[in-house]
Amino acid sequence: MSADAPADRPIRHESGRRLAPPSLAGVPPEPGVAKPDPILVADHVSRRFGGLRAVDVDHLEVQRGTITALIGPNGAGKSTFFNLVSGFDKADTGTWSFEGRPLQGMSANRIARVGMVRTFQLTKALMRLTTLENVMLGATDQVGERFLPAILRPLWRSQEREIEARADELLERFKLTHMRDEFAGTMSGGQRKLLEMARAMMVQPSMIMLDEPMAGVNPALTQSLLGHIERLRDEGTTIVLVEHDMDVVMGVSDWVICFAEGRVIAEGCPQDIGTNDAVIDAYLGSRRSLPHEPEETTR
Ligand code: ADP
Ligand code: MG
């Protein structure tokens, strides 16, 4: 740790892994640990599918203004947890609050309106909309797939100078202006991920949840996506990210929460998590590659 590093910047361990940012300095690396300024607090959130307990989170807090990564083997419950807290699936038990406001039982749309959004993959229907229309859809409805473009278009016309202007700003920001009037279906994998982020940003969220945003993206665009994510964090947006690539996790996250079999089994800054026995066991148990070791399998 160097003494002259700027106080507002996360500092790296000599291993290259990040240490906790100042806002999380001194928070012990313990599962379910309390944070100084949590934006999301979840208690006893569980979800069963038949006999399988997919999510069974006792307590989880996300610190405001950080990039928090959720990691864990396949099937650990990360995506289900995202779906539960964002209102896209119904929890069997539990309470959770965002900015101090209870969210359980609230629809995904209302949750988006209070500032917590998750990204969505482009479905077939959305591929037949233009890039601009896709981004504008983010302002209209977070589950836009349910609505036919034919219904939306006249609606847009009636209100939408302002929304169009905001969408254009986001296209500019995510370097997609040249694709503005092209069908989304013509985009590369990486461009689609940028579009998904732009769409989510239309509601000006204070927290954005990204489920494997780098999946299927080439390495050059991965860097650019990471740059966008860091910039959003630096501007004050809280980011929660599910990510498999440990180099990405270790390089970009301020804090890492590890799931296994539906539970939080470890948390800490990347430096702590990279040497955490419970994390290593979880990955070994699932025969996935360890952080910073060669991939056993290709995805
Ligand atoms: P992760 O995102 O960590 O890979 P998931 O949250 O997708 O894990 O899945 C957790 C567990 O729940 C897995 O065993 C998965 O098969 C199961 N699961 C997820 N969604 C459903 C569903 N809709 N119906 C039945 N089982 C499901
Ligand atoms: Mg998943």
Image (cartoon, grey):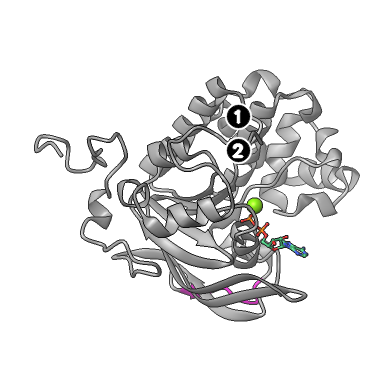
Residue type pointed to by label 1: Leu
Residue 94 image offset from top left, x and y in percent: 57, 80
Q: For mark 1, does the 10 Å Cα neighbourhood hold few (<14), some (14 to 19), or many (20 or more) residues?
A: many
Quadrant of the frame with the C terminus: top right
The reply to whether the magenta stretch includes residue 136 is no
The residue tagged 2 is 198
Q: Which mark is residue 171?
A: 1
73 up-or-down from 50: above or below:
above
- The residue nearer to you, when weighing 108 against 66, is 66
The residue range painted magenta reads 101-106
The disc, 2 or 1, on the residue closer to the chain's N-terminal end is 1
Please say if the residues under marks 2 and 1 sit with CB atoms less than 8 Å apart.
yes
Identify residue type, mark 2.
Ala
Q: Quadrant of the N terminus?
A: top left
Residue shown at 86%/41% (left/top)?
125
Q: Residue at x 40, y 44 (%)?
A: 253
* Residue 63 location (% of width, % of height): 37, 59
